[in-house]
Amino acid sequence: MAQAKGIRSESGKVRRVIVVGGGLAGLMTVIKLCEAGVPVDLFSLVPVKRSHSVCAQGGINASVNTKGEGDSPRVHLEETVYGGDFLANQPPVKGMADAAPGIVYMLDRMGVPFNRTAEGLLDFRRFGGTLFHRTAFAGATTGQQLLYALDEQVRRFETVDVEDEKGIVVKGEKMVRKFEFWDFVSIVQDDTGRCVGIVAQDLKTMDVTSFPADAVCLATGGPGIVFGRSTNSVINTGTAASAVYQQGACYGNGEFIQVHPTAIPGADKLRLISESARGEGGRVWVPKDPKERRVGRDVPEGDRDYFLEAKYPGYGNLVPRDIASRELFLKCFHEKKGVYNDKTNKNELEVYLDLTHIQKDVLKHKLAGILEIYEKFVGEDPYENPMRVFPAVHYSMGGLWVDFERSADGSLVAGSPRNQSTNIEGLYAAGEVDYQYHGANRLGANSLLSCIYAGMVTGPSMATYRKNMKTSGYDSPKSTFDKAEKRERAKYTDLLKLDGKENPYGLHKELGDAMLLDCTIERHNDKLDKVIAKIDELEDRAKKVNVLDTSEHANRGAQFVRHLNNMLVLARVIAQGARNRDESRGAHFKPAFKDRNDKEFLRSTLALYKGGEKGRSEVTYVRELDYNLAGRSVHVTDSVDISLVTPRARKYEQAGAASAAATGALDGKESKKSAAATPSA
């Protein structure tokens, strides 16, 4: 059969692809698709400018080396895979590190108001897991500035006419059509399993509608709300990833959940205090006396325990997040040395994050955004008082499994349709929803970079896939879309009929409490067994919920029940993956198995959905995958590509230990450019 060619399908419709998610990964994917001449339908659960990327604070990594410290993209690669405990495939990480300087300069040209030095150069701060000033930043609201810049570029394409292969304008068709307040429900698959569109629900009218597409990219963020309270927005339920996982997509490394060491404890939400606070010189401490009753600012220097600096003199307060979170947990939970509270007469799960030794004008220039958050929600002036913080669930290193094609130089083959493709033909994933770039632990400020880079990779990959299709998704039988639409409408109708005694929000709280208590910083197999049993119980009870709202318009109650069911499925993937991995690696820490076990577990966790007894979800773990892509069969395994940096012990007690060791591995000998000397902070 001949390839599908041109801008129109055989039926005469303009051939589009779909991007779900309006954050950095989704917007960059849209931009690259439009640059390739591919029209896009963009779907977003919320207004694009409210996508969760807007919440990112600290900055974006790029080894520009303006401070002359000897930093380079190579060292960025090394520290990223080292910080991720060697679980990330290294070619995608190399591609990301190599592209990072160009990405930052591109964003600068787009108008992102990055902080600058007195000479007018881009300013860079330090973040965890590195000794270099590598993080470009726009105050403490970097995510917002980046999101707004990319949104403006996408808005421009909303005004650009679609042209056919002869350059003739297609009347009434724009390069981007935006659908805000639409909830992704499922993909549409043809008889071969190929993704040819999506089913989505209009959250105003509650209409369930199918949309055709030549390919679909999910850029829908992480599953933080599975853990109840986290630093994530309430929209980050992981529902889209869960839905396609249940349709056959592989989920990779689900057990790796990052707990950020510094967030504001709260009853409703754990608000992030960015790592940039420590990057600018913030110090973490607790009083040496567990019964210390003086407020933080009144505790003399000699009575303070700067425990991160004492244990990790090379990196101090900027050790990677998994290490910092465990140290805070150890200090507060096990040693009972958290900040003492006179009112409750106990040591709280809190430590001090102190910025009071830094000049106010410097803090206002670089950190005003996060300090305003603290003052607003705590009611204390952080310029005068040490902030009280504790770890909180923040990020998922795991996500939808995606593929890549390695180039001869160890990076990625540009434009390969395998890059960022899931094991479902025609379905791609980018951003936190994928598992690709961070291994067992993400280094701070790599998240914004990985989202944008993934989008830059996914757009050309989808364009290549679309170009080589034999038949357009728009030429799939109408019955394919009618069947998918009918199925999802029936499911929604069934949701509205639920009138049991269980409260869905109550079930979500029980799920969040169980996951937060026993599936985060420390994991014990006996407790994980109880978490899995709890998920069994909650899945049974979820069939007896009361939907609480049966209105025909703007029905958030029924939508939440759907998200709850999908969260329960993902919770099992996370908990069961943690139960199976009997080692400690990155953010996954088991006191009973404290060492990393490369012999058994230097491999990706590949999870496939399986419906179980009594309507419960089950997980099947596989060591290899076969999938079709544009008429070709692809075979992959769970082995990790470690061809660039050889795995070795991960230690941060000495300055430069990570970079020096990794550089030597990359070169095959100790590199003269290893970070043996500690640059000034």
Image (tube, rainbow, N blue to C red):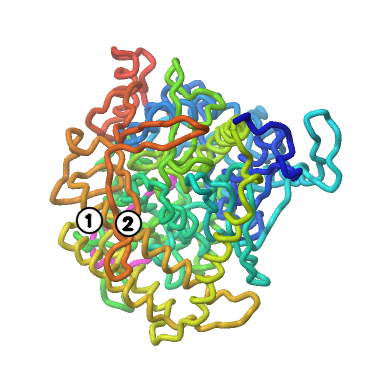
Relative to residue 444, is residue 345 depicted above or below?
below
Q: Is residue 449 left or right of residue 333?
A: right
- Name the disc covering residue 610, or none: 2
Q: Which residue is mark 1?
A: 523
Left or right: residue 188 versus residue 590 is: right
> Does the stretch in magenta take in 313?
no
Establish if 502 lies above or below 523. below
Is-magenta flag for residue 284?
yes
Displayed quadrant of residue 266: bottom left
- As rendered, which of 482 and 326 lies closer to the eye? 482
Instruction: Give the magenta part as a residue range.
Output: 277-295
- Three-letter code, disc 2: Lys
Residue at 20 percent across and 34 percent down: it is: 598
Q: Quadrant of the N terminus?
A: top right
User: Mark 2: which secondary structure?
Assistant: strand
Q: Quadrant of residue 410?
A: top left
